[in-house]
Amino acid sequence: MFKNYSILLVDGDIEIQDKLNLIFKNQCKQFILSNNEEEGLLKYKQFNPDIVITNLRKSNLDGIEMSRKIKELNYLQPIILLSSSVEVKELQEAINIGINAFIQNPIENIDKLVDTVQKLLKEFNFFNKYTHITQKHLKACPKKFYTDMKFIIQRSQEVIEEIDSLENLVMDNLECGIQESVFDAVIKSCPDELMILAHRVIVEQVFPERLEIESLEENGIIIGVEGTIYITQEYGKGDDFCEISNDFPFNISVDACVTNPENITVNPNAIKVDTSSWYE
């Protein structure tokens, strides 16, 4: 299965080391272990492995930074990133530097990790003949050429889908991670009064219910928030004075910082209240 290939595992987790050592050690040409990223980079330069598996964790040189340095040495180097938790910033960096695969909760997804290694080695072997041309590759074979081109097109489509999947993972985890901060910022930023329906409309309560990442760019994040706003409408004066309590759906877009998503900016004037039910 892996007998012609070498694998470098950079992970100090003993449980992961034991499980992968049991799977790969007797099946691949060389299974190289490293407990930390500094040592891992040195062993990469020493052994030039076919696959690198590393963990995402903070140390003097974490998995992302080591992967960046490896990609600078060889951008085509297949790298699999492991993580027990997901941080939006790190995932974005992983996508930007060209990490080939991401496995969340590797202990629970060993089969997926093994399948991913097989898949990357298969691709490595396929594309190797285009980056290391020998005389046998100069012999024309139209049928094989079109078969290879079909595979390349199919794989390219799969890569696009994998990128979309990573982006969706980033979005989902970002939404979960910042929901409380965003809702709190919207509540605190809402004005005490609104100019809707009546001369004076008092805001009694703002209740955000849903949020969605509308845009995730290098210069910032735009987040759409929807919910219900509870108000009291005041009409007339003196004996003609009356109050009517009501609630309406609202939506508002807020801005957040990419490097610190909890740094949120809310424009209170941007709140949009849907009062169409008032006229029904």
Image (cartoon, grey):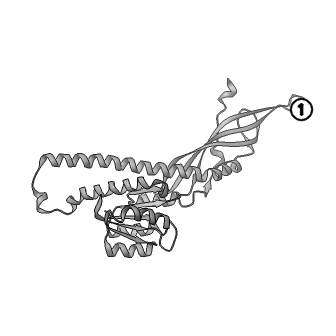
Give coordinates of residue 246: x percent, y percent.
75, 33
**Three-letter code for the amino acid on which mark 1 is drawn:** Gly
Residue 214 image point, x, y percent? 52, 46
The residue depicted at 90 percent of the width and 29 percent of the height is 239
Tell me if 169 is positioned left or right of 1 in this view: right
Percent coordinates x, y for residue 139 in the rendering: 9, 55
Tell me what residue is drawn at x 52 percent, y 57 percent.
88
Query: Which quadrant, please, contains the C terminus?
Result: top right
Secondary structure under tag 1 reads: helix
The quarter of the displayed image where residue 17 is located: bottom left
Q: Is residue 253 above or below residue 80?
A: above
From the top left corner, tell me how far across and down residue 162 is, in percent: 39, 49
Q: As drawn, is 233 to the left or to the right of 266?
A: right
Residue placed under numbered mark 1 in the picture? 238
Question: In this rendering, is residue 204 above or below 89?
Answer: above
Q: What is the count of numbered marks? A: 1
Q: Quadrant of the N terminus?
A: bottom left
